[in-house]
Amino acid sequence: MTIRATVKGVGHYLPSRVVPNSEFEKTLDTSDEWIRTRSGIERRHFAADDEFTSDLGTKAAQNALDMAGLTPDDIDAIIVATSTPDLTFPSAATMIQQKLGMTRGFAFDIQAVCAGFVYALANANGMILSGQANRVLVIGAETFSRILNFEDRSTCVLFGDGAGALILEGETATGTAEDRGILGVDLNSDGRHRDMLYVDGGMVSQNTGHIVMQGNALFRQAVEKLASTATTALTKSGLGHEDVDWVVPHQANIRIIQGTAKKLGVSMDKVVVTVQDHGNTSAASIPLALSVGVERGQIKQGDLLVTEAIGGGLAWGAVVLRW
Ligand code: UT7
């Protein structure tokens, strides 16, 4: 017998403003055709002027709580993966704790950029297995629109805002790969590639800065590293690519998603794809895809899922879980 961190609820929230690719044609030397063919993105959501990461995260969390039939005080811990917190501190997690009306437990942020949700799942799993918390609300929430340089066509057309949330709870299980819950985790980083994707603001500049990305160099790293980390997480779980029901990848670029699926030996009809509607929402992209995948009727209880992500750092990783 063992304990597994098992999914109890999922939810998401997208700001109401939808920005189609054609919006960028008005101010930049770009086209809907270039954005679609190079990235797969057709539209993204941008937060309102008075809407911040903690607002998006709170709404996604409330939706996940409603699905699980739980109240905020049933939760022991909140972990928020974000690179765009409302303020430098306090954490977005404590702000969400307050906005939910949760008066117990603890809350903190994790910053691993686009790999943030995978890192947050790994941390939640560790806390549940070690007995530090039994029910953990894991949120990915971002407002990347606030750190975009709208004069840089190579980055500003790629990102969007949104949030997704998952509730994990420790449950007694058999200890086999047939269990529901998190079965395997693989995390990696390599700071030598820090210049490939970063924000040029922070303490060094005393402002929040803008995204700078060597898209092409990162693209070349992505497929290789994502396929490798997903394979490692599957091996750690005692499973192989033939066992996978759904790949739920970070949604940065349809060509990266397709290339990774091909390398993994998984066909595209087993991949949850939302990049066309959300763009790259960094740490929010995987929980958004999980929630949309359930809403569409793709992901069902008992399905074997692999999530994988890569981003600034570089930081990358994968989590295998049975829904
Ligand atoms: O979430 C974190 C992880 N992020 C990623 O994994 C992103 C990885 N990178 C990518 O998704 C792709 O590299 C991009 C979508 C960013 C770019 O696609 P690409 O096929 O690698 O294009 P490229 O950077 O090689 O640029 C090709 C051309 C360039 O023009 P020249 O030098 O060939 O004349 C760019 O200047 O496309 C040009 N370009 C654009 N043209 C129209 C760059 N951005 C645009 C644009 N519209 N928005």
Image (cartoon, rainbow, N blue to C red):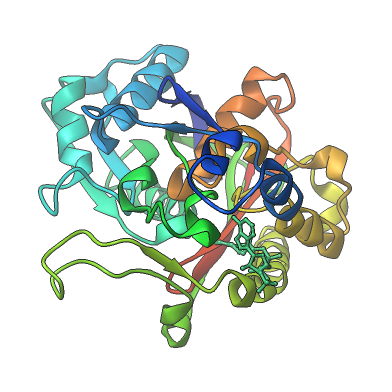
Residue 41 vertical placement versus 153 (above, below): above
Give the quarter of the figure containing the C terminus.
Answer: top right
The residue at the point 48 percent across, 45 percent down is 27
The residue at the point 63 percent across, 18 percent down is 295
Camera sees residue 18: yes
Quadrant for residue 203, please give it: bottom left
Residue 69 lies, in percent from the top left, at: 41, 11
Considering every residue shown, the one lying at the far bottom of the view is 192
Camera sees residue 238: no
The residue at the point 65 percent across, 62 percent down is 233
> Closer to the camera, 292 or 149?
149
Residue 5 vertical placement versus 195 (above, below): above
* Quadrant observed for ligand 1 in the rendered image: bottom right
Quadrant for residue 191, please give it: bottom left
The residue at the point 37 percent across, 56 percent down is 149
Residue 276 lies, in percent from the top left, at: 66, 37
> Closer to the camera, 4 or 121?
121
> Closer to the camera, 24 or 78?
24
Residue 28 lies, in percent from the top left, at: 52, 50
